[in-house]
Image: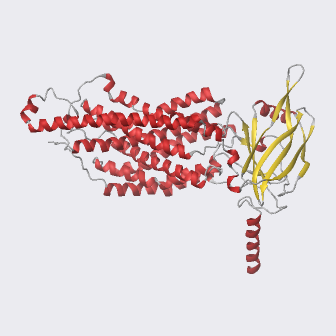
Amino acid sequence: MQSSSFLAAILFFISAAFASDSVHKYQPDDAVDLWVNKVGPFRNPQETYNYYSLPFCHPSGDAAHKRRGLGEVLGGNELIDSQIDIKFQKPVGKTTICEIELDEAQVMQFKEAIDRDYLFEFFMDDLPLWGYVGDFHSKRKGDNQHMLFTHKSITVKYNKNHIIEVRLTQQNPKPLEVGRKLDMTYSVRWIPTNITFARRFDVYLDYPFFESQIHWFSIYNSLMMMFLAGLVSTILMRTLRNDYAKYAREDDDLETLERDASEESGWKLVHGDVFRTPFSIALLSALVGTGAQLAMLILLVILFAPVGMLYIGRGAIVTTFIVCYAFTSFISGYVSGGMYSQHGGKNWIKSMILTASLFPFMCFGIGFILNTVAIFYGSLAAIPFGTMVVVFVIWAFVSFPLALLGSVVGRNWSGAPNNPCRIKTIPRPIPEKNWYLKPSVVSIVGGLLPFGSVSIEMYFVFTSFWNYRVYYTYGFMLLIFLILLIVTVCVTIIGTYFLLNVENYHWQWTSFCSAASTSVYVFLYSIYYYCMKTTMSGFFQTSFYFGHTLMFCLGLGILCGATGYLGSNLFVRRIYRNIKCD
C-alpha cells in the first residue's frame, strides 16, 4: 500500500513536470488551461468584478480556482478554469462553448457593460489576454445598437515545448435582443516561432513609451536639479569656511566678542540650544526610523525587480513589498530607538510601539475605507478576511518583533548622547525675522527642488499603474531615486543653515517637514494627472485613485523627511564639532 502511494506520488510529480502551466512545459496534446480572471470598465482599472458576474457561459459544476499568492489577492485577481478544451499544438476549429438565451436582465447587463467599455482578462500559461465584451453598430437612423462578440479566436505561438505568445481576437458580433439565442464559440490556432522563452514577455513591454526622449529627459532634468543643489551646497561650504574664520578670530579676542555681542548674529550663538530635545521626540523618532526603513525597502525592491523580473508575475511586486517591509523592520527600530535614547527619552516602550505600528496602521486605516467601498460595489478589489489575517500575522509575528528588537539594539548600541555642545538650562529667545525665514515657509519651499527632480518620472510611474502599462525601467527608477535622496539632503541642509543663521534652533522638525513637503507636491500633481491625463470616473475609481495615491504620498513624505532629517543632523553635528562650544 505504501509503495503504491509512493509510486502514485512520483507519477503525479512527473506528469506535472511535463504538462503544467507552473513549469511552462508541454508535450503535444497536453491540456492547456485557459483561466478567466476579471472584467471591468476600461477607463477604471481598479473597478473590477468576477468574470462570471456577467451572464457568460459558466462552466458546469464547480470550476477549479487557481491558487493565489498574497500579491494576487491584494491585486484583485481570481482565476477560474474556463473548462474550454485546448490541447497543446492541436488546432481547434469553430467550436461551441455554450448557447445563451437572452432574457431582459441579461440584455441589460450586457448593454451596461458595453456602454462602459468593459474589458475582460484571461490567462493562458500565465500570459494575459484581453478583449472587450462588445461594441456598437451604427444604424441608418443614427442610433447605436449594442453588439455582443460571440466568437473568441485564440492565436498561440509556441517554440518547441513552450508557449511564447497568446492573442485573442473578438469576432462575430450579434445584436442584443430579448429572447435571442446566441452560440458562444471559440477557435484556436497554433503558430511556431523562433522567439525564445526568456523573451516571451517582451511583447507586453511598451518600449516606445518608456524609452522615449521624454523619459531620457527625466534623467537630464534630475541631474540638473542635483547640479543646482550641489552648486548651492558649494556656496554654503564657502560661507561656512568664512564663518569658521570669523568665529576663530572672535575666540581669540574675547573682549571684542563681549563688546559686539549685541550686534553679532549667526549659527554659533545658538550652540547651547541647537541640540535641545525637540517636542514630540517619540513621534519624530518613529517617523525617522520608518523613513529609513522605507528607503531601504524601496532600494531592495528596485534591485530585486529587474533581477527576478517581478513585473512579469501577477502580484509579485506587492508580495515582495510586503515581505521586504517585514524583514526591514529591524532598521526602523534601530534608527528610532537610537535617536530616541540619544535625546534622553524615557518612555521607550511607547517609542517602540509607535515605530512598529505608525505607518502600517495609517495604511490599514486607508485600506479599510477602500475595502468597505469595494465590498459595497461587489468588486474583486475587496480583500478577503483570510488575506487580512495573513497580512496581520506577518506584521504581528515578523515585522513587530523585528522592530522591537531593533529598538532594543539601537537603544543600547547607539543611544548614548554625544552632542558636541552642552545644552544650556534656559532656552535662548528666538528673535523675530523676515517672513521668508520662518520654519513654516522653509518647510513649504523645501520640497520644490526634490519634486522637480522626480516630476517627469512621476508621469511614467502613474501611467504604468493606472493605464495598463507594465513598468520595467527600474534602472531609470534607481537613478532617479538616488538623485532624489541627494537633492533632498542638500536642500534640507541649506534650509537648516538658513534657519540656524537667524538664531532659530528648532531645526529638527523643520528639516523633516521641509523634505517631507515633497509628497505634498506629488499629491498636487496626482490631482492634475487625474483631471488631465485620465478618463477615470465614478466614486469607486476616484476613491481608489486618491486612496492609493495618499498611501504612496504618506510613504514618500516619511521617506524624504527622514532623509532630510538625517542629513541635517550630520551637518549640524559636523559644524558645531569644529567650533569651541563654551
Residue 330 pos. (x, y %): 43, 55
Residue 20 higher or lower than 509, as above or below: below
Which residue shows up at 80% across the image and 63% down it?
A: 27
Decide which of 109, 569 is in the foreground and name it. Answer: 569
Residue 19 higher or lower than 438, as above or below: below
Decide which of 293, 248 is in the foreground and name it. Answer: 248
Residue 179 pos. (x, y %): 93, 35
* Chosen colour scheme: secondary structure
Is any atom of residue 558 visible in this view? Answer: no
From the viewer's perspective, is 195 left or right of 471? right
Query: Which image quarter holds the C terminus?
Result: top left
From the viewer's perspective, is 221 left or right of 507? right
From the viewer's perspective, is 306 left or right of 32? left
Count of all numbered marks drawn on residues in the image: 0
Residue 205 pos. (x, y %): 66, 44
Is any atom of residue 255 visible in this view? Answer: yes
Residue 500 pos. (x, y %): 26, 33
Which residue shows up at 29% across the image and 22% down it?
A: 434
Query: Which image quarter holds the N terminus?
Result: bottom right
Which residue shows up at 87% across the image and 46% down it?
A: 186
